[in-house]
Amino acid sequence: MHDFILKEVVSHLIPFIQIYGIYVIMHGHLSPGGGFSGGMVLGLSMVLFVLVFGLREGLKKISHNTSTVVESLGTAWYATVGLVGVLRGASFLVNKAAGIPTGQPGELLSSGLILVITVGVGVKVGSTILTLFVELIEEGSEE
Amino acid sequence: MLKNLPVMVVVFLLIAGYMMPIVARWDRKKCAPLAALAMGFGVLGSLVLMNTVITSGQPVTYNLGGWIPPWGIAVKIDYAESFMLVLLTGVGAIILWYASGDIGQELGHKVTGWYYTAFLLLLAAMLGMAMANDLFNLYVFMEVSGICACALVAAKGDREATEAALKYLLLATIGSGFVLFGIGMLYMLTGHLNVDFVALQLRRVWMFYPTVTWVATSFFVVGFAVKSALFPLHIWLPDAHSSAPSPSSAVLSGLVVKIYAFALMKLLYLVFSGLFTESFPVALAIRYILLVFSTMAILGGSLFALVQVDVKRLLAYSTVAQMGYVFLGIGLGSPAGLAAAMLHILNHAIMKSCLFLSAGTFIHVAGVRQVRDFAGLSKTMPWTSAAFSIAALSMIGFPPLAGFASKWYLSEGAMQSGEPVFVVLMVVSSFLNAWYYLPLVGRIYSAGEGGAAKEDIPLSMRLPVVLLAACCVVLGLFPKIPLALVYRAVDKFLLK
């Protein structure tokens, strides 16, 4: 597809979509949304890129290798952050009771480990959405 | 560390499972040792937990995130749960050992990493189901194990396996949907999700809402019966278990269907305990339904197995029949009946894994899948053939083997609850089992070609099978070892 207007508009739009996705992930503990919804927005921005610029350009940005690694690390990150509580002598997935500073309620950094976990979830969901989409496209183009 | 052991057993398997695809990209050969490390930790952890439960006589409890029960998610490991943990990790480790030799060749190296991911996640989910003391947590782990089990079936990627996996996925979703509705109703009635609190509260309120209690109980029975393939609801099982790669078949037939039966047993006797044993007509009806369906399963599964020509389909139908024994024990509800159900969960896990894995070796090395081509296999593969035969004889119920112990205690359970007709059923079903297993064993030891290829069987595919066959013999000779633990578990189930 050689649509100049579409490509130009989308290339300016994608950064804003991604910033919004990151915003939703970061404010998961304060407002509606969180890791899943924010990750979805991030993933859909990449899907938009693949739709407009084509699969080959998209795979140049994020290859299969990268998305595999990101997906695996995203989920492993969740479980690993859960271990922080164990290492500090409390139980699994403990937040405040493990002595993590939680800050002032209502501020951005006010949830201790929840924000750290949500980032992992967001990254994982984003790359999973992209992987699902790419798998579908590749299956179609093979035949 | 010891305090956190219950959750660590699950979390280590989860983390190892998630890391597998990365490890496979980096160096495929490192997958198996890492998986073995995680499984080894699981086995050790389960043994330590079982030891703790037995020596202290108290259940091990654990509150996730430090939130105490009615609010937080709790984990509780009692005799029954520790029994299941050791069974799941032990048999799972042996199957994983076999898979490390088999999976690369059977599936191609591209999916090896993902296969280990699905395998480890499945085991972690089953361990989570076994130890969950929270209904919604149980449901979540059920979904995880359902999806991983589908992935294990679909791993082969051919037309047959994909169709079977899709069928399995759809029916398993219906099953877990029923369970979810049941959980919703219990939550509506009692306002709790923690098993202990639900049980306590349900005893106070069920007489005000008899219909809802009835519906909730039926939903649990139907949901778990679909998931563990009780006879009229078994249609997904033969396809899924026969078209999957052999280690998948072993883990699905040996462990996955059992954990749902165990969950149903736990719910019926711990949550609905007050009503299930009193003169509540619904409880009686559900017991009779379980008895009727399990009778149908025992006879029907064996009759279907009789006419199969593909060895893996035969074994899959045999699983349908054997799940009948487990549900028969649950339905009988007497101490010996319940103990026999749990003993059979263990014995069948070992026998059926042994059968599926050795059949996998036959298929892989000699390239024979049809029963009629089995002639002369004993010459080319003496050890695997011997293991297959021991497990098959144990399935029939020959005296010094594990299957005999299960049937013996089931008969005792039938006598205890005053239903001697099920003793006759045991005898009839043993004849049926002999009818399709004995010709198979005879065929293996008869003279014949014994398959075309004579390549060496790797040690990692031979030793696990022999080990499982040895377990059959040991458990048949000393059934008192697991029964000592099982009877204590059953006492807790039947505690009023």
Image (tube, helix red, strand yellow):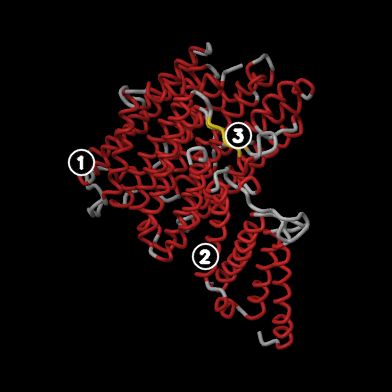
The residue tagged with tag 1: helix, strand or loop? loop
Would residue A124 be found to the left or right of residue A37 on screen?
A: left
Q: Is residue B477 visible?
A: yes
Query: Residue A68 has which mark?
Result: 2
Q: Amino acid at mark 1?
A: Ala
Q: Amino acid at mark 2?
A: Thr
Q: Where is residue B140 shown, x and y percent of the image?
A: 62, 44
* B107 over B416 or under it: above or below: below
Mark 1: few, some, or many residues within 10 Å (few <14, many ≥20)?
Answer: some
Chain of the residue on which disc 2 is drawn: A
Who's the residue at 43% across and 19% down the image? B409
Mark 3: few, some, or many residues within 10 Å (few <14, many ≥20)?
Answer: many
Q: Where is residue B187 shown, x and y percent of the image?
A: 73, 34
Q: CA distance from mark 3 to mark 1?
A: 54 Å
Who's the residue at 42% across and 37% down the image? B307
Which is in the foreground here, disc 3 or disc 1?
3
Q: Nearer the N terminus, badge 3 or badge 1?
A: 3
The residue to which callout 1 is attached is B447
Q: CA distance from mark 1 to mark 2?
A: 51 Å
